[in-house]
Amino acid sequence: MGQSPDSGQKQTPIDALNNALDAGTLAHVRRMLNSLPAAEVADLLESSPPDKRKVLWQLIELENEGEILHEVNADISGEILRSMDTEELLAVTEGLETDDLVDIVQQLPEQLSNELLQSMDAQDRQRVELVLPFAEDTAGGLMNTDTITVRPSHTMELVLRYLRRHEEIPRFTDTLIVVNRKDEFLGLLPLRRVLVSDPGMTVRELMQTGIEAIPADMPDSTVASLFERHDWVSAPVVETNSNKLLGRITIDDVVDVIIEDADHSLMSMAGLGDDAETFSRVIHAAPRRALWLGANLITAFIAAAAINLYQETIQQIVALAILMPIVASMGGVAGSQTLTIMIRGMALDQINRSNTRWLLNRELIVAALNGMLWALVVAAVATLWFGDQRIGIVIALAMFINLVTAALAGVLLPLLLKALKIDPALAGSVILTTVTDVVGFVSFLGLATAFYM
């Protein structure tokens, strides 16, 4: 017998687990499931339909649930958390880092979150209540309170003795934070200096000064940009109106922000929420999409109204109805290319007043060059197809006009939407499609009317 195409390939742990689940060997699934890293289990849950996901969750051991909940998306974790009572929640959240704990508390109904807070020990409750007032998308909402602080007068020998008193230091600790007696941030002491310096040297002699800590109200996207620009592993967070140390942000949370921002841009351009998961239930998926479809329907009626203005022209020249979609489609694609570049530039904080004019000029020149190229191509095709040189000229001019308009709209629309505090990724594509459709139809049919009627 011949081998199957993938028989020589090594089976991944998740593939093996899926096969065991399909075979119904739940005891084997339980063992495998609880031996996998939390991130892989979370990936499996997100890749499973709701009924299968429910079975998998029941097989996960209690001590693993908290870390897995932190890894899955908000839709799934929220659904699971709402099904738990206070005792279960307390067991699940035991040992979690502060920022992960706050994420869970924020997803709970108010009554349940209050019960959970009251059930915590005083130290855990104090840590959570310090972070909880900050919005989720700010530096304060991202931070952990697991800082290791030292004073400027401490010697390296004292610092090393202090570190050895810990069973382990917090993850992603690359620096110690230097503060004064009022817990005000003064600077950073890299661990690489602590380990190789003379034990008699003081923190003041080795610390890095002139470093600005992150204010607690800084948007998380700005925090992510700073980490990317400076290659940070961690960074201190201070009160916005003072220099008092509150906590620190670590690279693992910044990576999550980067992924969420990218996911937001992708989902928003399709009119979907950030938490729209692949296997969400029909009752959740349908309403989310209905609103966006309704918005698109309005834009379609606007384009139809533009076509209706030239009803008599279309009735006399049938070729126009055949060629109309080409003009609109080319404008839509060209506009989407420019819009995507602008939204990406805004997300990376690369676009400002000083370079907007340059970008606009560049996009207009690119659109004009492409407009001339493809206008000549489509003019030749239309002339040969319908044996009428006039229709070739009409569609060539209309395409050039629409491509240049698409570039102009692709640059200016996101800037205008941002000024109006509207997410360009969410609203930009709908408005752009309307602009390119209407301009494409009006220019094509208007020129046809002038040439033929």
Image (cartoon, helix red, strand yellow):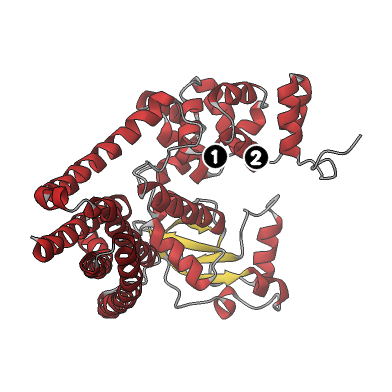
| Residue 344 percent across, percent down from the top left | 39, 64
- Inspect this view and state whether residue 362 appears: yes
Q: Percent from the top left, x then y, of residue 8? A: 85, 44
* Crowd around label 2: few <14 · some 14–19 · many ≥20 (10 Å): many
What amino acid is at disc 2?
Ala
Give the camera-side residue of 169 and 421.
421
Labels 1 & 2 near each other (Cβ < 8 A): yes
- Neighbor class of circle 1 (other Cα within 10 Å; few <14, some 14-19, many 20+) is many
Tell me the SS state at disc 2. Answer: helix
- As drawn, which residue projects farthest toward the right? 1
Q: Mark 1 points at which residue?
A: 70
Residue found 14% across the figure and 51% down from its top: 316
Asked whether residue 181 appears in the rendered view, the answer is: no
The number of numbered discs placed on residues in the rendered structure image is: 2
Between residue 180 and residue 271, name the one nearer to us: 271
Q: Quadrant of residue 398?
A: bottom left
**Residue 201 against residue 391 in the figure, above or below:** below
Establish if 59 lies above or below 395. above
Q: Determine the secondary structure under disc 1.
A: helix
User: Is 324 left, or right, of 214 in this rendering?
Assistant: left
Residue wearing tag 2: 38
Q: Where is residue 26 in the image (x, y as percent from the top left)?
A: 74, 20
Above or below, 254 relative to 15: below
Q: Which residue is at the front of the view, 146 or 182?
A: 146
Q: Which residue is drawn at 53% across and 26% down?
A: 89
Mark drawn on residue 139:
none
Q: What kind of residue is marked 1?
A: His
What residue is drawn where x is 44% and y is 31%? 117
Q: How far apart are marks 1 and 2 (CA)?
A: 9 Å
Q: Which of 322 and 37 is in front in this view?
A: 322
Quadrant where the image shows the N terminus: top right
Residue 242, quarter of the rendered image: bottom left
